[in-house]
Image (cartoon, grey):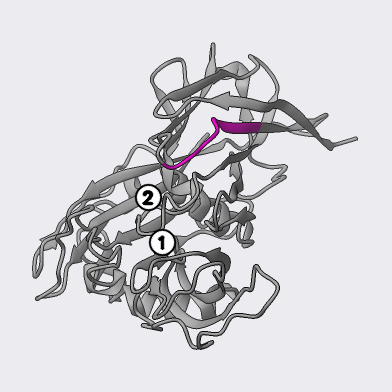
Amino acid sequence: MVFWQREFYRQQTSMAFGQTFELDLPRSGYLGSVGLAVHSSLVSGAVATAEKWRLIDYISKIELIGDGAEVIKSFDGRQALACNYYDDRVVPWGKWGNYLAASNRQAMVINLGRYLHDIDHYLDLSRFEQVKLRITNDATSTQYSTDIKLDVTLHWLREPSGATKGYFREEEWKLWNPAAATWEYTDLPTALKIRRILLRARPGVDSADAKNNSSMGRLMYDIDFSLRTGVTRVYRGSLDNLGRMSMEEQGFRPQTSGLICRTAAYGFDVGLGYVTGFVSAPASMGATPATYPITLAQGDVQDGSQASIAYQADYPLHWRADGYGYMYNLPLFDSQFRDDSDVLDPDVDKVVACNIQCQTGTTVSGTNHVAQNAIVLSRLVP
């Protein structure tokens, strides 16, 4: 009988600030997914103006590495959430809040298959001598009062009826800083078949107001995706158009929510590249209700960084947003068939090109960080 075993491999393991946590996985078994949960408690008032206000913002790298060098998974925490979302079509659970010494939590699943509990695709750990899980954070005691606690859950496929069709290697394959009115020309690798191409566009941010300096749509204003050295065009258009089509084609869109205690006029990232709806209300933490206006947010639908117009002590803003571009990611290509018959084979269709232009006049600078674009590939390793 085929079944899935869920093993709590590590619980409440401490990860020191600014360090890389390493964990050796078992040397054999059929691994379908790795579940991660991180949590810690904020220093009261520490991120009232900081851009990075959620715990996941401080997870700078998550990796699965085989035999010390072979990339199985490699991305930062926010990218891991996006990959989880586009796999399972459910927003990963997290407790996003910064009121006083709030507890911060984030859960996610890193799938070796197409989705959680994919019986066709999984990693046979015996193909490597050793697989390591590595998690790096850049948090400090300025932001958090306790070490980051980590839970690891392994999802094992037991008694499979056939052999695996392979696993999916997923990584931030190309990163670059866009320049206004400039094209970035890219030929995709031919070594492995491609299951999914995610495009990520993160705007630059200034420390003065923690707001985005631009939008994801302007950072990838013109996209030319083609096969066979430009003979066969697959997509030509903007990232915003791709976002609207993503909701129609995939039949779902992300929603995020949180409790934010923010200095007035400072932005806070809601985890969406394009906000189609935003509702908010003051959450009274005392005996009497809040007295300041309920209309608190500046709803720029092209900007994932919202802002509170007013702020009153002990009355944080409770908000919910929906839209597209979860964690500033959108799928350019996404195969759907379990038998892999619709995966992209760049070796057959070469040259596969993904050329992207940043819009003229776009602000790409930022004192916190400059704008960054990325191509994130999920490729089938047979």
Amino acid type of the residue tagged 2 in the rendering: Val
- The residue furthest top is 129
Image quadrant of residue 281? bottom right
Give the tally of numbered discs: 2
Up/down of 96 relative to 170, above or below: below
> Taking 83 as reference, is 117 left or right?
right
How busy is the neighbourhood of tag 1: few (under 14 within 10 Å), some, or many (20 plus)? Answer: many
| Mark 2 lies on residue | 376
Quarter of the image for residue 367 reads: bottom left
Q: Residue furthest right?
A: 1
Q: Which residues are magenta?
A: 143-151
Does the magenta segment cover residue 147?
A: yes
What residue is shown at x 55% (from left), y 33% (from top)? 146
**What kind of residue is marked 1?**
Asn
Identify the element where label 1 is drawn. strand
Q: Which residue is mark 1?
A: 329
Residue 31 position by quadrant: top right
Question: Closer to us: mark 1 or mark 2?
Answer: 1
Q: Confirm whether the magenta stretch covers residue 145.
A: yes
Residue at 52% of width from left, 51% of height from top? Answer: 81
Image quadrant holding the N terminus, namely top right
On the image, the x and y values in percent for residue 230 come to 20, 64
Residue 327: x percent and y percent?
A: 44, 60
Pinpoint residue 68: horizontal percent, then vertical percent: 42, 16
**Front residue (pair 150, 91):** 150
Which residue is located at x 24 percent, y 58 percent?
207
In the foreground, 81 or 52: 52
Q: Above or below — where is 127 with respect to 333?
A: above
Q: Is residue 218 above or below residue 58?
A: below
Crowdedness of circle 2 by 10 Å Cα count: few (<14), some, many (20+)?
Answer: many
Residue 334 or residue 299, whichever sits in front: 299
224 relative position to 241: left or right: left
